[in-house]
Amino acid sequence: MRDELAVLLRIVVSEACFALGRACGSRPAVCCLAVVVAASPGAATASPLAGEGYRLNSPVAAEGDGVVVRFALAEPAHVTLTAFDADHARAATVAASRALPAGEVTLSWPCTDDAGERVAGGVYYFVLEATSEGGSARYDPALEGGGELIAMEFGQQSYDAQTRQLRFRLDRPGWVRARAGVHSGPLLATPLDWRPLPAGDHRIGWDGRDESGLLDLAAHPGLSIVTEAFALPPGAVIVAGPARASSASKASGADAQALERLTRVRKTATTRGVASQYLQPSAQRISPGFTLSWESGGPPLLPSKAESLPLRISADPETVARLAEQRFEIVTFVDFQRVGEEELGYLPYTVQVPASALAKGVHTVSVSLVTFGGQASTRSLRVQAGDR
């Protein structure tokens, strides 16, 4: 662009000199003008990156394996490559201002942090920066995409009750949640709880039972399965291995530059229109675990003259603390029919199942914790009710 502008100015100046020479009765050579073309401070410079972004050797890194990142440089440059996790917190520096020649470049990340420890299993992506004499460039995939809803069309998902497998297809890599329940009743199981998966056809084993192991949902005529997905950032890799505590806490103690980037990532994601779960810390996307028990011990039994059956909800300290930061409700079902609701839930909590909903016989009582962020967990018990 700068060269094109210089040529254009030379033509304009030449014509101006010729016209001025004729006006003053002299030859054009007598008239001399000096023109300097300089780049303004905000003018664009050449990018040392040849092409957009980077490529990976595989979208998945098995346990013990590393990741190979490939990209091309148009000219020699100093390159910085940084790995970030699903919460957009820095996980490791793969290369720090490393001098690299022009051409195809290959960098390896062993899936370890800066201390050499294996990172937790999960989703990671890379921010690529290059600086040369001709200019600089930065590629941040989290500013380009991620979080978009992935449509699960009819026919792309099913459950095979014979093989006890969920089957579905992803058109692009994404986080997937599959929830199962009874039509018009509670969600009773979460076979997939926002698990990251690569694009393609998937078969995921699920025994067909509810979260309490009490009900064989696969054999229920009213079985209903809902599968949802949203996209990983471009260029993300799924690192296999055990998950650990979310690194969202790192972001709270990060420096100003990291917090500024995190704000920019969330702002651009909101502008694109993404799934609400994408903007949540990854640990808060997961459905909360809890225990449902009868306070008196032994099999739950409703005495003939009792007005209600008390059931106790409890959870581990980490879950209690997590739910204390969110609003959630407690919903009670008897034989898959809603009979009660506490809109402002807290833990521990005692549910009073009304005796009017428990006719003589055996019933299934289910209690769901449903957060305002869309997470839900359900536990069930068999309850014996006597004569009223």
Image (tube, rainbow, N blue to C red):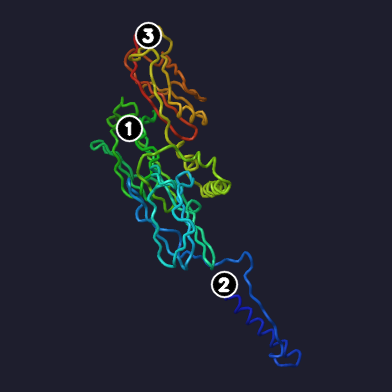
Left or right: 331 with respect to 157? right
Q: Give x and y (percent) for residue 379.
A: 38, 25
Q: Which mark is residue 303?
A: 3
Picture quarter with the C terminus? top left
Secondary structure under badge 3?
loop
Q: Give x and y (percent) for residue 343.
A: 51, 25
Q: On the image, numbered disc 1 is attached to which residue?
A: 223
Q: Earlier in the sequence, mark 3 or mark 1?
A: 1
Q: Earlier in the sequence, mark 2 or mark 3?
A: 2
Give amino acid for label 3: Pro
Q: Nearer the viewer, mark 3 or mark 1?
A: 3
Q: Give x and y (percent) for residue 196.
A: 38, 44
Give amino acid for label 1: Leu
Picture quarter with the N terminus? bottom right
Contact between labelled residues 1 and 3, with CB atoms less than 8 Å apart: no
Q: On the image, numbered disc 2 is attached to which residue?
A: 1
Residue at the (41%, 51%) spot, across then down: 236
Up-down relation of residue 204 to residue 218 (above or below): below
